Image (cartoon, helix red, strand yellow):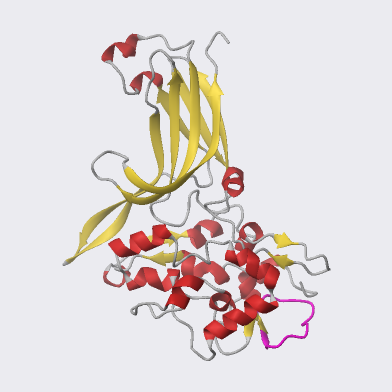
Amino acid sequence: MPPGWTLLTLLLAAPAHPMPHPAPPPRTRDRPAAQAGCVTCHPAIAREWSESLHHVAGSDEPYREAHAREPLPFCQACHVPEAPPRQTPSAWAEAVGVGCVTCHLTAGDAVLAIPGNHDPATPHRLRRDAAFAGPSACAACHEFAFPDARIVPRPDLMQSTVQEHAASWAADYACADCHMPWVDDGDARGHRSHRFAASRDPDLLARAVGVSARRLPGDLVELTLTPHAAGHAFPTGDLFRRLELRVQVIDDTNPRAPQRHNLGRSFATRPHGPVLARAQIADTRLHAEPVLVRFDLHDGPGPVAAICEDLSQSWVAWELRYQRVAFPDPRRQGGAVLDGEVIVAHGVLPGASE
């Protein structure tokens, strides 16, 4: 970081150059050729990017299935930003996803970069911008309203990660501090990791939240979720992401289904003048304060006689799962079709006599 720069300077800097954006950038260069040049000259970073969700943004199966259900240009603009959103993307644009050129070649021929102490000899010009080190680099693709925003007086945000970050304990830190940690290159400089750790990284998810569990009188189980390393709401991003808490009595002679409780955002379609628009009706995600959830072990599925059963000696298993919901299933309460989930934390509570 150059002398005189502070982290606050970087975070508050107004962009002097165009930041990464879902709209297709000006085609001032042959972008496939430019992307190939990035990969050739920066092989270590390219390997990291090749393993990232950015790389598969336009080709992984959950996105392809979702886009087949709702083929909106709005979605393609972020997931396949190297193609015009209203056109069928080329095989290259779909395969590259969010590429090197998407974030670093936002206008003209100069490569966008963070402030540095020196400019090494490069085959291209550099445009160093303090804003690229802060939330502005991520904001255009990670905070936006619903597609119907233009016709709704006060539209809800479909994703609100940047606002959540600004209201969190991590407001003075950059998104990259967690999602692009420094990697030792073996020299004095190093580089930011381009694996873009996110919702499919079990270690990152485990650091995001603390979970404690205890038994209470009356066969109650209390789980407390405490925000830890997440610098935004947890979960954030996609409107259908959610947490699922599970509690289950361990009984080999009388197996029981687990009780479940979901934390996430809920939406409804409501009239706005002559049109219908989507609006948020509830947000039970983990924000700045701990969330406490209690389960009555007698409320789980089972015969009515179980209400009077003494469960104080029974062991109880609990889990916290991070779920990527493909789409809600309206046929049952809390129902959903998942495209994946990660067990973030789990444990067992012994019976009273243990």
**Quarter holding residue 309:** top left
Nearer-the-camera pick, 339 or 113: 339
Q: Does residue 270 appear to the left or right of 234 in the view shown? A: left
- Above or below 308: residue 159: below
**Quarter the N terminus occupies:** bottom right
- The answer to whether residue 9 of the structure is visible from this angle is no
Is residue 117 a member of the stretch shown in magenta?
A: yes
Please provide percent x and percent y for residue 66. 34, 60
Nearer-the-camera pick, 335 or 137: 335
- The answer to whether residue 301 of the structure is visible from this angle is yes
Q: Residue at x 38, y 15 (%)?
A: 254
Q: Does residue 2 appear to the left or right of 203 in the view shown? A: right
**Quarter holding residue 17:** bottom right
Please provide percent x and percent y for residue 248. 43, 24
**Quarter the C terminus occupies:** top right
Q: Residue at x 63, y 75 (%)?
A: 39
Please provide percent x and percent y for residue 35. 58, 79
Q: Residue at x 30, y 68 (%)?
A: 71
Q: Which residues are magenta?
A: 113-126
Q: Does residue 140 appear to the left or right of 137 in the view shown? A: left
Is residue 70 a member of the stretch shown in magenta?
A: no
Please provide percent x and percent y for residue 350. 55, 16
Specify the principal SS of the magenta part: loop
